[in-house]
């Protein structure tokens, strides 16, 4: 199936999102380096810890971006294993719990389905507003690969512009980098022969569902 036409503005906004996500940890690395340079020898343990944590976060953000938005995958592992590892690494915090369930037997995810999965997981994480639980499920369905993302927590809701782009509506002049990512996820779903269903029928809960009609 032919994917929707993507305006160059969408590409620019996606790159803006990647730069925004990487700016924090890379800036923290630089701040840590400045602290080390100003400290007496032997008093730099805290700064070195900050540098190490920030460098690991930046590496994970970059690998996630490569899997979610790039042409290839996250690493030399399988797409399913990479998706699970990166979603848990980036989305799990003191206030956010991530649950992962995969029922594909010994099969791996096709590359484009893995990209769809992590983009929908990112949409669910954005809906949480920094607190709650994110349940990610992928498995064999009757007609393809079923993906379910459930975000539950206080105030969990999709921003209106995010909801619109996930549904395929593109208002380019007013689109934000986060909303552009939603439109990209919509394009991936169409390319996989499916559509994204958004369920916000209960307060503090967002459920995203799709079926990718791409076999292994």
Image (cartoon, rainbow, N blue to C red):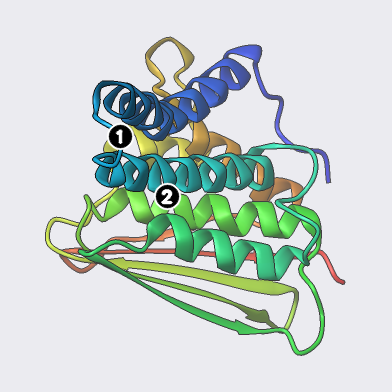
Q: Is residue 27 shown left or right of residue 193?
A: left
Q: Position of residue 128 (x, y in %)?
A: 26, 56
Could you say which quadrant of the image residue 14 lies in?
top right
* Mark positioned earlier in the residue sequence (2 or 1): 1
Q: Position of residue 127 (x, y in %)?
A: 29, 51
Cα distance between the residues tagged 2 and 1? 44 Å
Dot 1 alpha-carbon crowd within 10 angstroms: few under 14, some 14 to 19, many 20 or more:
few
Image height check: is 43 above or below 208?
above
Residue at point 25%, 21% (across, down) = 38
Residue at point 24%, 28% (across, down) = 39
Quadrant holding the C terminus = bottom right
Circle 2 sits in a helix, a strand or a loop, which is it? helix
Could you say which quadrant of the image residue 59 lies in?
top right
Image height check: is 168 above or below 137?
above
Dot 2 alpha-carbon crowd within 10 angstroms: few under 14, some 14 to 19, many 20 or more:
many
Which residue occupies the extreme top position in the image?
Answer: 173
Q: Where residue 2 is drawn, which disc sits there? A: none
* Residue at the spot of label 2: 123
Which mark is nearer the camera, 2 or 1?
Answer: 1
Q: Position of residue 83 (x, y in %)?
A: 62, 62
Q: Nearer the viewer, residue 140 or 79?
A: 79
Circle 1 sits in a helix, a strand or a loop, which is it? loop
* Residue at the spot of label 1: 41
Could you say which quadrant of the image residue 28 lies in?
top left
Q: Position of residue 209 (x, y in %)?
A: 50, 65
Residue at point 76%, 90% (across, down) = 105
């Amino acid at each position: 199936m032919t994917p929707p036409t993507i305006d160059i503005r969408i590409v620019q906004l996606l790159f803006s999102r990647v730069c925004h996500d990487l700016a924090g940890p890379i800036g923290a690395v630089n701040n840590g380096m400045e602290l080390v340079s100003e400290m007496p020898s032997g008093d730099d343990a805290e700064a070195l810890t900050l540098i190490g944590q920030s460098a690991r976060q930046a590496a994970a953000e970059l690998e996630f971006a490569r899997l979610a938005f790039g042409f290839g995958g996250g690493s030399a592992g399988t797409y399913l294993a990479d998706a699970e590892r990166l979603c848990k690494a980036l989305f799990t915090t003191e206030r956010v719990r991530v649950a992962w369930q995969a029922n594909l037997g010994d099969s791996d995810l096709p590359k484009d389905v893995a990209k769809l999965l992590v983009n929908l997981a990112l949409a669910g994480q954005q809906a949480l507003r920094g607190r709650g639980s994110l349940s990610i499920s992928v498995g064999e369905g009757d007609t393809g690969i079923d993906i379910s993302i459930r975000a539950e927590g206080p105030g969990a809701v999709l921003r209106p512009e995010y909801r619109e782009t996930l549904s395929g509506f593109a208002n380019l002049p007013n689109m934000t980098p986060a909303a552009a990512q939603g439109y990209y996820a919509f394009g991936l779903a169409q390319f996989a022969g499916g559509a994204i269903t958004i369920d916000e029928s209960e307060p503090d809960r967002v459920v995203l569902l799709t079926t990718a009609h791409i076999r292994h």
